[in-house]
Amino acid sequence: MIELRDLTKRYGAKTAVDGLSFTVRPGMVTGFLGPNGAGKSTTMRMVLGLDAPTRGDVRIEGKHYAELKEPLNSIGALLEAKGVHGGRSAYNHLLCLAQSNGIPERRVGEVLEMVGLRDVARKRPKGFSLGMGQRLGIAGALLGDPRILMFDEPVNGLDPEGIHWIRTLMQHLAREGRTVFVSSHLMSEMAQTAEHLVVIGQGKLLADTSMSQFIAENSRTHVRIRTPEPERMRDALFAEGLRPVTAEDGALEVDGGDAARIGELAAAQRIVLHELSPQQASLEEAFMRLTAQSVEYHGHAPPVGTQVPPGGAAVPPGGTPTPPAWGESWKKGGRE
Ligand SMILES: Nc1ncnc2c1ncn2[C@@H]1O[C@H](COP(=O)(O)OP(=O)(O)OP(=O)(O)O)[C@@H](O)[C@H]1O
Ligand SMILES: [Mg+2]
């Protein structure tokens, strides 16, 4: 269990983490979400005592990180995959970690096997790809067989097989009763992996809830109907007190409608349906809706109808070249 109480971190005038209080519980994967710069990595660094809170407190199984006797046996973490001595072999890197935490040497071979790096165990991480570096970081986190695991964007750089593997691994660790706390920007992946979510924006807590409740509360569910007789269908829906809207492609959409009831209504009126589908919003839509106000770093899309050829000026379809109007403003959208 990881417990945060009013956890706050300021860097000069910037409040990176702002009064966070929540508990990460065992037995499930808890996803940690937030836009770029929301304070996720800073929070995780404070859990590990790598950054001191300006105010508040964070405890691991009731203790501060510094009070843990052999920390790798309590909490395993992957924060910065490149935080490895580049000249030491993967095996020796893990052996050093093991020896400083009273972990037997045989465990080094076991975790290298688990993460699929056995064949490069004697190679130096300097030459590792991004994904291999992530796997080595995960091996380090697993070394002490800890009750708590914390991963900051672990799927970053992993290939599809690697992403599938880490999803399965995290779920397996959670089923064993461990606490698994993981951040990621890959919403579709998170939707499949996490059972519980903690969402922050500009350092503040926005949500601490189950995945299903989060999607239900922050998104629009509706029923989509396509029919060759939209006028009759609309009238029938109105008569039932439902308020359909017409989508761009001509389909009717009924907010919060019940598909079975709508199907029965169409059958009673002998209206032909080409589609009747309940639409459940995705985690991505729910996340974007909730965090829209707290996104600090926006990108800018080129204006609609403008094509930008590689290395060339913007050219409206069939028109003469114009200066790249959005080209000047992109810097504002970048990280300052
Ligand atoms: N050592 C530091 N010194 C000054 N400011 C910092 C420091 N570390 C983080 N910050 C600032 O704190 C804020 C939160 O950063 P943090 O890296 O925790 O965000 P994040 O949620 O992990 O973002 P991302 O999704 O991009 O990884 C940012 O505005 C960042 O610039
Ligand atoms: Mg981060």
Image (spheres, grey):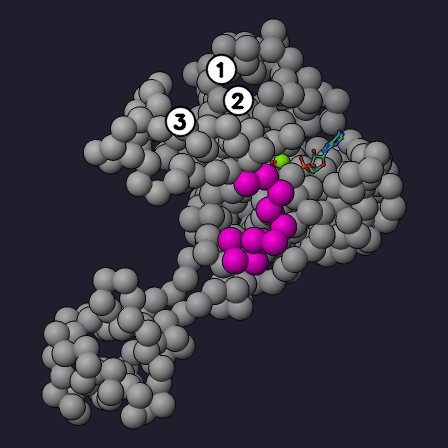
Q: Nearer the viewer, mark 1 or mark 3?
A: 3
In magenta, the rendered stretch is 288-298
Q: Does the magenta stretch include residue 158?
A: no
Residue pictured at 74% horizontal, 26% vertical: 102
Residue 164 rendering spot, x and y as whole percentages: 40, 40
Tell me the distance, in whole angstroms, between the alpha carbons under discs 2 and 3: 42 Å
Looking at the image, residue 245 lies above or below residue 218: below
What's the residue type where badge 2 is placed?
Answer: Gly
Residue pictured at 63% horizontal, 27% vertical: 80
What kind of secondary structure does the magenta stretch mostly adopt? Answer: helix
Residue 81 rendering spot, x and y as whole percentages: 59, 25
Q: Which of marks 2 and 3 is in front?
A: 3
Residue linked to disc 2 = 133
What's the residue type where badge 3 is placed?
Answer: Pro
Residue pictured at 44% horizontal, 68% vertical: 220
Label 1's element?
Answer: loop
The circle drawn on residue 128 is 1
Looking at the image, residue 2 lies above or below residue 166: below
Tell me the distance, in whole angstroms, between the alpha carbons under discs 1 and 3: 42 Å
Q: Is residue 245 visible from the viewing direction of this image? A: yes
Q: How many labels does the image show?
A: 3
Work out whether mark 1 precedes mark 3 in sequence or the reverse, and give the earlier one. Answer: 1
The circle drawn on residue 323 is 3
Residue pictured at 55% horizontal, 35% vertical: 333
Labels 1 and 2 touching (C-beta < 8 A)? yes
Residue 123 rendering spot, x and y as whole percentages: 51, 10
Label 3's element?
Answer: loop
Q: How many neighbours does mark 1 have within 10 angstroms: few (below 14), some (14-19), or many (20 or more)?
A: some
The reply to whether the residue tagged 2 has its Cβ within 8 angstroms of ligand 2 is no
Of 16 and 121, nearer the camera is 16
Q: In which quarter of the image is residue 232?
A: bottom left
- The image quadrant in which ligand 2 is located: top right
